[in-house]
Image (tube, coloured by chain):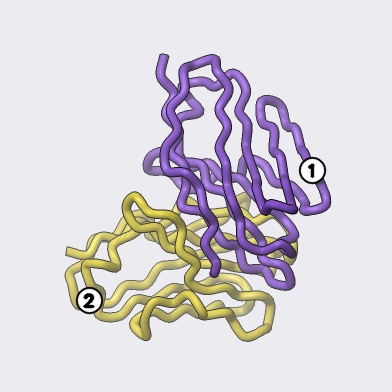
Amino acid sequence: GAGVSQSPSNKVTEKGKDVELRCDPISGHTALYWYRQSLGQGLEFLIYFQGNSAPDKSGLPSDRFSAERTGGSVSTLTIQRTQQEDSAVYLCASSWVGNTIYFGEGSWLTVV
Amino acid sequence: GEDVEQSLFLSVREGDSSVINCTYTDSSSTYLYWYKQEPGAGLQLLTYIFSNMDMKQDQRLTVLLNKKDKHLSLRIADTQTGDSAIYFCAELLGGTDKLIFGTGTRLQVFP
């Protein structure tokens, strides 16, 4: 597609439920990133995929968070047993290796 | 550590120049970026500079890089109300593809 596509754009969920956030990167981009932005805060790195290499998961805040990337393209970020502090915008980005990184519009998650 | 530092707020009058500063962490970072985020929107890439450059100009935007001090700045000439947003600097850590962001500077432009 023309840009990085994320879905859903908005999600309200009850505390304790699981959520899945999807990212479609720009076609052909081998690198894919997930970041989190809490209200009024900067961007927090979560996880990075590059081709077939093992992902860099160093930013995942707890074992409730996981992500996968199927076929080197689409990625899903899963948050299990959501907590109110998980409320944030989850941003996905993609790039060619070493090149400009482009962001999606984000998935706005609210845990009530 | 991996803290990219920016001042939190900047307020300027319409028509004046704005200068947003950033101190990054890794002297081997290859690319340094400036992103803009308008309220309720995603991140928009404004410009970037390769680490072997000192300056890059793109229309109203001028990026200055001081590698010795690990200091990056973004100058916006003739600032307009539409420039009001949060501006994030980011560094691409050397030897990786990990992009680390600053805390963001909220720019407010008043008439």
Residue at image x 52%, y 53%? B5
Q: Which chain is purple?
A: B
Q: Nearer the viewer, residue B10 or A16?
A: B10
Q: CA distance from mark 1 to mark 2?
A: 49 Å
| Residue type for callout 1 | Asp
- How packed mark 2 is, by other alpha carbons closer than 10 Å (few <14, some 14-19, many 20 or more), is few
Residue at image x 42%, y 37%? B9
Q: Colour of chain A?
A: yellow
- How packed mark 1 is, by other alpha carbons closer than 10 Å (few <14, some 14-19, many 20 or more), is few
Secondary structure beneath label 2: loop
Q: Write down the chain letter for disc 1.
A: B
Q: Write down the chain letter for disc 2.
A: A
- Can the viewer see residue B51 in this picture? yes
Q: Which mark is residue A17?
A: 2
Marks 1/2 in contact by CB < 8 Å: the verdict is: no
Secondary structure beneath label 1: loop
Residue at image x 51%, y 20%? B80
Q: Which residue is mark 1?
A: B54
From the viewer's perspective, is residue B12 above or below residue B50? above
